[in-house]
Amino acid sequence: MRIAVLGTGSVGTALAERLEGLGHQVTIGTRDVAATLERTEPGAMGGAPFAAWAAEHPAVLVASFAEAVGQAEVVINATSGAVTLDAIRAAGAEGLEGKVLVDISNPLDFSAGFPPSLFISNTDSLGERIQAEFPGTKVVKTLNTLTAALMVHPQALADGVHSVFVSGNDADAKATVTQLLREFGHTDIIDLGDITTARGTEMFLPLWLRLMGVVGTPTFNIKVVR
Amino acid sequence: MRIAVLGTGSVGTALAERLEGLGHQVTIGTRDVAATLERTEPGAMGGAPFAAWAAEHPAVLVASFAEAVGQAEVVINATSGAVTLDAIRAAGAEGLEGKVLVDISNPLDFSAGFPPSLFISNTDSLGERIQAEFPGTKVVKTLNTLTAALMVHPQALADGVHSVFVSGNDADAKATVTQLLREFGHTDIIDLGDITTARGTEMFLPLWLRLMGVVGTPTFNIKVVR
C-alpha cells in the first residue's frame, strides 16, 4: 500500500522503517522538508538526526504533509499530540477525503513537567477531535498505548502475547488497520467500538507513564486477561 | 485484624465475606444501620437485599460508619465514588486518625448515562482528595481496576496471572495492604508510587468499562507484561 506517515520523531521513523520493510511504499510527511533535513541535533528521544535516518532509508520518501497525504491510500498520524491538529490541517481535508487516517497521538500536556496531564480527556479525546474536524476521513485510533518499538515489533516482548486496541466509526477502515497490525505481528487486537472509545486508550496514558517509571523501561505492554 | 468495610454494595459485601473467611474480624459500616437492614429491594448489581446477606454472614457485624471505624485497625472504603467523601466524613477524622484507609472507589459520573465520565480526573484524583481532607490517615488506593469477585478471588481468572496496583504516600501502609492483597491471592502487586498515581488507575476506568462491553463480562483484568 501507499502509506503516508506524518511525523519524523521516534514513532514516525519506527513506523516508516517497518512498513517499508514489509513492502509498503512509504512517504514521511513533515511541515518543512528542507528544515527537517537540515536538522543536525539528535531527536527528542536521543535518536539520530532525521537526515542521517533518511540517508539510511533511501526507499522512504520525504515530502510535505500535503504531498505525502495526496499520494497515500492510508495516512498515519505519528506527530506529537500538541501539534497533531495543526499537522493534519496542513495536510489538508481535500487530500484526506475518504481515506483511512490512523491516529497514534496522545494529548499529552507537558506544560507542568513530568508526568504530563492530558489537554483533552474525559468527555472528549484527540481522536474524536480529528474525526469531528475531518468528517470525510475515516479515523482509526490505535497503537497509542505502547512504545514505538513494540508498536511495530510486538513479538519482541513475550512472544507478542499482549494486547492492542482499535477505535473508529468505520468497520472497513478498522479492518484495513487491523490487517496492518497483523503484519506488524499483533495477535490480540481488540476492537473497542466507535471513535469515542479513544477516550479510554488516551486516558490510559497516565497509568502507562507511571508504569514506565516502575518497570524502568518503556518496553512493556498490557495483556487483557479474559 | 479488625477491619471496617464502608459500604454495603457488591464490593463491600464481597470484601467483608472474603476477609471474614480469612479470619479477620469484620464490621461493615453504613450510614443508617436500621434503614440498611430494612431494605427489601435487590442490590444495584442484582444481589440479595443486604439484610438477607447479613443474616447469612452472622460473623460480620453491621454498625454506623463511625462505630465501624472506631473499632478498626484498617478501614476499607467500598462506597461508590459519588458518596465516598460524605461517607468518610460521617466516619469522622478522629476515628480515622493514624489508620490505614484502603480506597477502592472510582469517581464515576453517571449523570449523562453509560458509559460514565469521571467527576475528578487528570490533575487530581478521588484518592488524593481523601488524603488531602484526612491528612492524619494513610490512604492506599488499590483494587479499583477490577471487578469485586476478582478483587477477593484473583485466582478465579487465569490462575491469578494478572496485575493489581497500589498507590499511597506511606510505605508501611502499602506493606499492610499488600499483605492483605496476598491473602486474597494476588501475586503481581505493583507499587505505582505516591497517592498522585491514583490518577492513573482511576483514569483506567474508561478503558475498563469499554473492555467490559467487548469482553461481555466484568470478569477480566489486565496483566502488565514486562
Image (tube, coloured by chain):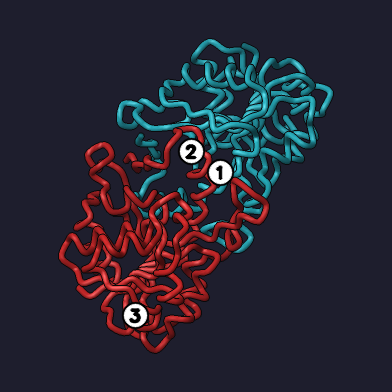
Chain colours: A red, B cyan
Query: Relative to A164, is B181 above or below?
Result: above
Q: Position of residue B193 (x, y in %)?
A: 59, 31
Classify residue A220 by image quadrant: top left
Q: Is residue A183 left or right of residue A84?
A: left
Pointer 1: residues within 10 angstroms few (<14), some, or many (20+)?
many
The amino acid on which the numbered mark 2 sits, given as a three-letter code, is: Leu
- Outermost residue on the bottom side: it is A94
Gap in angstroms between the C-alphas marked 2 and 3: 35 Å
Q: Nearer the viewer, residue A90 or B47?
A: A90
Q: Position of residue B27 (x, y in %)?
A: 65, 20
Subunit under mark 1: B
Label 1, secondary structure: give it: helix
Pointer 3: residues within 10 angstroms few (<14), some, or many (20+)?
many
Q: Is residue B64 left or right of residue A133?
A: right
Residue A193 at least partly seen = no
* Callout 1–callout 2 Cβ contact below 8 Å: yes
Q: Nearer the viewer, residue B118 or B63?
A: B118
Subunit under mark 2: A
Label 2, secondary structure: give it: helix
Q: Position of residue B168 (x, y in %)?
A: 63, 29
- Outermost residue on the right side: it is B94
Q: Which residue is mark 2?
A: A211
- Outermost residue on the left side: it is A23
Residue drawn at (78%, 31%) of the image: B134
Residue drawn at (43%, 24%) of the image: B186
The label on residue A69 is: 3
The amino acid on which the numbered mark 1 sits, given as a three-letter code, is: Gly
Query: Relative to A36, is B65 above or below?
Result: above
* Image quarter in which the C terminus of chain A is found: top left
Subunit under mark 3: A
Q: Which residue is mark 1?
A: B200
Pointer 2: residues within 10 angstroms few (<14), some, or many (20+)?
many
